[in-house]
Amino acid sequence: MENKADVKGNIEEYVHLSFFVDVGKAIVSAKGLSDILNRIMEQIGKIFCPLNWSLLLKDPRADELVFKVVVGEAADVLRETRISTQEGISGWIARTGQSVIIEDVSKDKRFNDRIDRITGFTTSSIIGVPLKTGDKVLGVIELINKLNGQAFTPFELKVLSTIADFAAIAIEKEYYIRAIRKISRQDHLTGCLNRRSMDIILSREMERSRRRKIPLSILMLDIDDFKKINDIYGHLHGDEVLKVCADTLFRNVRKIDYVVRYGGDEFAVIMPDTDAEAAEGVRERIVKEIAEREQSRERYRFSASVGVSTTDAEGELDVNGLLAKTDQDMYFQKERKEPLYIDENLFDFLEDEDIDPDPELIL
């Protein structure tokens, strides 16, 4: 027969395992990444009863971990704090992709007390697991100090690791969904928003402009003789010109402005809370930079015509009216310019610039 201690241990294990159903339900019913993380951490609190627990996500661009969900003492202080993956127990878990139980952190050389100094909390014991899909570590779940003062157990580590696997799958799925949404909104070549996104944003900003009685300006840019650029130098060269054009726009507008690839060789910039004078200043900066590039010997040089317009004070212009007005100004600017001269001596250009020729032109 099993003794009382064994029976008690088995019951506790069954209780822990029963929480997997709740974890699964929480993940399935969650809406968005933030909701997923919060629901997972809520279930972890019920299962393990730690004093403090955190979920950190990895920022691969900076090789850092970011505290995204923090529960317990000084949670507000710690949230969004960043730590290096070279730092502390969490960093070790992120680097190695391994789980760990530490009964006494004072005896572990990997422990770093910097977070304790930030929060005023004293860490005694830790259980931590990676959020991992395949060999890729997405983050770390870390539990600190049990409420009853006892040590975390190997069985609890197994349970937490299983929950972390569920969480990693949910997080990866959310990342993919976000990536798909981003792809659906963006032009893959230039990184600009696409026409579909522009229609949504412009309608929203027009309504906001009308409601709050603030100006909204639109800038439209058309690359001059873009077809000739493609015909003479090839489509790969033309793609690079488009990317340079997009980069020029990004450099000369604010972060709150929206840069859009409007059509094949046309771009637009939606500028909220921007009056006609400010919009004209943006146009001048862009025209100046493009002119300087055109006069240089840089490989991907081009010229462009830029039009701008601003919502009327009475708010009578609708989306189509504002776009038509901007388009009209752009073509007015184009008609005032001298025709673009492109050197059609293709082979001399290729020899100078070391560009692969367009096979269709050679044939």
Image (cartoon, rainbow, N blue to C red):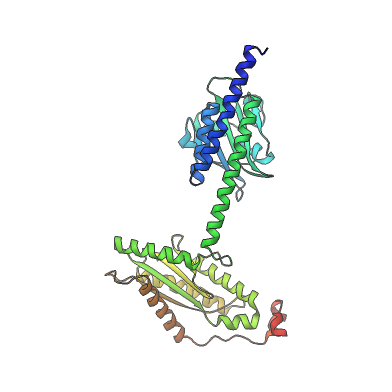
Q: Nearer the viewer, residue 197 or 92?
A: 197
Compared with 5, 101 (above or below) is below
Quadrant where the N terminus is found in the figure? top right
Residue extending furthest toward the left: 314
Examine the rendering and report whether any part of residue 68 can be seen: no
Q: Nearer the viewer, residue 248 or 176?
A: 176
Total marks shown come to 0
Q: Nearer the viewer, residue 292 or 112?
A: 112
Give the x, y percent position of residue 176. Answer: 58, 52
Examine the rendering and report whether any part of residue 360 can be seen: yes
Compared with 311, 44 (above or below) is above
Quadrant where the C terminus is found in the figure? bottom right
Give the x, y percent position of residue 198. Answer: 45, 66
Give the x, y percent position of residue 217. Answer: 38, 69
At x 44%, y 63%, the residue is 257
Give the x, y percent position of residue 179. Answer: 56, 55
At x 52%, y 30%, the residue is 45
At x 51%, y 28%, the residue is 46
Compared with 322, 170 (above or below) is above
Compared with 307, 100 (above or below) is above
| Left or right of 284 in this view: 14 | right
At x 64%, y 42%, the residue is 132
Q: Residue 107 lies in what quarter of the image?
A: top right
